[in-house]
Image: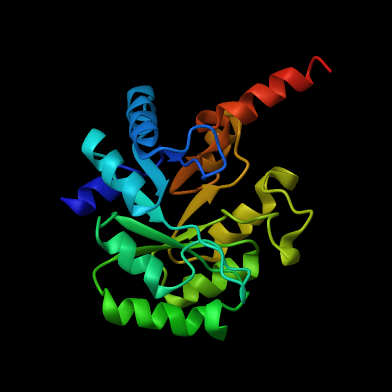
Amino acid sequence: MENKKIEQLQGKLIVSCQALPHEPLHSSFIMGRMALAAKEGGALGIRANTKEDIREIQSQVDLPVIGIVKRDYEDSKIYITPTIREVQELMEVKPEIIALDATSALRPGGLTLDDFFRQLKETYPDQLWMADCSTVEEALHADELGVDFIGTTLVGYTEQSKGDKIEANDFEILRKIIASAKHRVIAEGNIDTPEKVRRVIDLGAFSVVVGSIITRPQLITKRFAQALD
C-alpha cells in the first residue's frame, strides 16, 4: 500500500504545509486544514514539520507525507532533522518519507552525514529518506549514500550555494542532478509558478514540492502589496 502511495507522487504536486512558531498560521489544526485544502486543489502529497502537525494532517488527508523537524542546535548549522532525536519524534507518526539536511555541514556533536545516515539505515531499515541538498555535489553524494529521494530544497540557502537560484539557466542544477543521480529527484525550493512546476517535471523530476506561494499568506500578500509600493 505504501509503495502505491509513493508511486502516485510521480509527476505530481506535493504541497509543503508549514508554519513556524513566529508565523500567524502556526497551529496543527490550521496545518491540517491547509493540507485538506491542498488535497482539494489536486496535491498528491504533503510535506510537514513536527509530529504534532503531521498527526493532525494524517487525520485530515490520506496522502503520503514527507516529514521533517526543524530545530536549532548551537554547535551546528544543520536545521532540518539534525539528529536522531528528531527522527525518533517523527517515527511516532511514521510519515512515508523523512527528509533531512544532507548538506556538507557537520551535524550537532560533529557527526558527518555519512555516519548519521548509516545509523538511520541500521535503526530504521524500512523507512524511506529524502536528502535536502544545496549543491550538485551534495546531491550526488547523498545519491551515492543510498538516500531514496534527492531534493533541491536548500539551493541558495547555504554558504556554499549562496547566490544560486534553482531556476537559473533553465534549472541547470536540477538537470545536472537528474542526469547523474540513480535515485529519484524531487524538485523543491523557490518553485513559485505553475510554469516552473510544469518545467521541472518535464525535465525529469520525480515530483515537485511547492510551499510558501501556496501556504504562507503573509508572503503571498507581500508580493501583491510590494507591487503597489
Viewer-nearest residue: 210 or 94: 94
Whole-percent x and y of residue 201?
A: 50, 41
Quadrant of the drawing holding the C terminus: top right
Whole-percent x and y of residue 208?
A: 48, 43
- Which residue is farthest left? 1
The residue under the point 33% across, 53% down is 51
- Which residue is farthest top? 228
- Which residue is farthest right? 229
Q: Is residue 76 left or right of residue 201?
A: right
The residue under the point 28% across, 66% down is 127
Report the coloring of the rendering: rainbow
The residue under the point 20% across, 52% down is 2
User: Is 26 rendered above or below residue 36?
Assistant: below
Counting the numbered discs, the total is: 0
> Which quadrant would residue 29 be assigned to in this image?
top left
The residue under the point 67% across, 48% down is 166
Q: Is residue 7 left or right of residue 187?
A: left
Whole-percent x and y of residue 35?
A: 36, 33
Viewer-nearest residue: 169 or 56: 56
Whole-percent x and y of residue 112?
A: 54, 82
> Which quadrant would residue 39 be assigned to in this image?
top left
User: Is 201 rendered above or below residue 30?
Assistant: below
> Which quadrant would residue 87 be assigned to in this image?
bottom left
